[in-house]
């Protein structure tokens, strides 16, 4: 666990304005986190792949008020497998890499790609298209000292083409670029393993040697399927979907996982447990610190 250098929570704007991000950051500072992952695409900072100068200046002025280590989450809709938008996404990702440098972030999160069920003719080139884009972006990031963290996602519709966690790891290994690492999202891996009948722990083992960033939040590994809740909390009640719950609310065995796996140096354990669980964040923070120290036991909700 000595390779994990910090932990904290994600933060973003809820209305596209800076004041809601500032409120989130101040709350996290009061909790005592050392690291924050900025959801920069929740703000208008980039237009058509170009940074908006006055907005970028406001971002730097805001983030510099806090003594956080920052990481940055790129486009949540990022998808380098999509032939139509890949070029636009690369332009936006390069702009985000520049913004990373301005706020002192050395990590830019990039979601692994997918294709719709009807994009059959694009499947043959999907992996190559993603790898080419990742290489171009990683090369662009070199002078900034920013690493792209390629995150494993889960199948969101029947017939979709998407890489498994171990295949995401294989992409990172194949490119073998110093500015590209894997990002393990444990809950995503759990859901995809359930959906595909994979060995969850083996999928994590494949990713760990090339993982330089972690997304931690609890779940039961149950795919969303066709169930649609009326209230978001109804998903939680059924234990279905990508729940982003506090540690211990689901059934992921964090203690055993972190006792087994070792990650790359300078890895951040980022908890994607947002302001919805503000009152539970302090306890999750303490549990994460114990996991990093190697002496934590995460108890399940009774």
Image (cartoon, grey):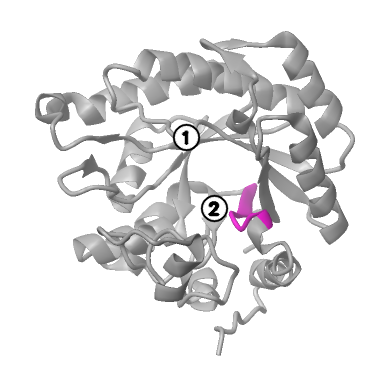
Per the image, is 273 magenta?
Answer: yes
Q: Residue at x 48, y 13 (%)?
A: 91
Residue 251 lies within the magenta run: no
Task: Tell me: 42 left or right of 89.
Answer: right
Q: Are marks 2 and 1 in contact (CB under 8 Å)?
A: no
- The local secondary structure at tag 1 comes to strand
User: Percent x, y for residue 104?
Assistant: 74, 30
The stretch in magenta equals 266-275
Label of residue 214 in the image: 2
Q: Where is residue 179 in the image (x, y as percent from the top left)?
A: 52, 30
Q: Residue 110 carries which label?
A: 1
Image quadrant where residue 227 sits: bottom left
Can you give x and y, in whole percent of width and height, for residue 266 in the image? 64, 47
Quadrant housing the N terminus = bottom right
Among the 4 quarters of the image, the one containing residue 116: top left
Location of the C terminus (image quadrant) = bottom right
Query: Which badge, 2 or 1, is on the more N-terminal residue?
Result: 1
Q: Which residue is drawn at 68% across and 69% down?
A: 284
Residue farthest toward the left in the current orientation of the protein: 121
Q: Residue 157 carries which label?
A: none
Q: Which residue is pictured at 48% across the width and 71% down the height?
A: 257
> In the figure, 285 relative to 9: above or below?
below
Residue 154 in the image: above or below residue 95: below
- In the orientation shown, which residue stands out farthest toward the front? 230
Quarter of the view holding residue 248: bottom right
> Is disc 2 placed on a helix, strand or loop?
strand
Give coordinates of residue 44: x percent, y percent. 63, 22
| Residue drawn at point x = 45 percent, y = 74 percent | 237
Examine the rendered structure and indicate whether residue 255 appears above or below residue 268: below
């Amino acid at each position: 666990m000595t390779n994990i250098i910090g932990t904290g929570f994600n933060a973003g704007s809820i209305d596209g304005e800076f004041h809601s991000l500032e409120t989130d950051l101040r709350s996290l500072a009061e909790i005592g986190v050392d690291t924050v992952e900025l959801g920069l695409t929740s703000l208008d900072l980039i237009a058509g792949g170009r940074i908006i100068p006055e907005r970028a200046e406001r971002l730097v002025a805001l983030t510099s008020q806090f003594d956080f280590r920052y990481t940055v989450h790129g486009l949540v809709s990022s998808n380098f497998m999509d032939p139509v938008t890949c070029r636009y996404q690369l332009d936006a990702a390069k702009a985000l890499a520049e913004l990373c440098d301005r706020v002192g972030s050395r990590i830019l999160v990039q979601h692994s790609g997918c294709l719709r069920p009807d994009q059959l003719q694009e499947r043959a080139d999907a992996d190559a298209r993603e790898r080419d884009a990742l290489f171009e972006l990683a090369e662009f990031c070199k002078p900034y000292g920013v690493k792209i963290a390629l995150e494993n996602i889960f199948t969101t519709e029947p017939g979709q083409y998407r890489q498994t966690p171990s295949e995401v790891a294989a992409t990172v290994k194949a490119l073998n670029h110093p500015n590209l690492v894997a990002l393990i999202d444990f809950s995503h891996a759990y859901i995809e393993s359930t959906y595909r009948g994979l060995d969850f722990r083996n999928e994590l083992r494949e990713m760990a040697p090339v993982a330089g960033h972690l997304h931690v939040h609890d779940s039961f590994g149950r795919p969303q399927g066709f169930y649609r809740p009326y209230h978001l909390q109804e998903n939680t009640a059924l234990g279905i979907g990508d729940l982003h719950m506090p540690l211990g609310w689901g059934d992921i065995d964090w203690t055993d996982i972190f006792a087994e796996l070792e990650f790359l140096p300078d890895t951040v354990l980022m908890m994607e447990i947002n302001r919805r669980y503000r009152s539970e964040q302090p306890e999750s923070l303490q549990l994460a610190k114990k996991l990093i120290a190697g002496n934590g036991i995460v108890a399940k909700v009774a």
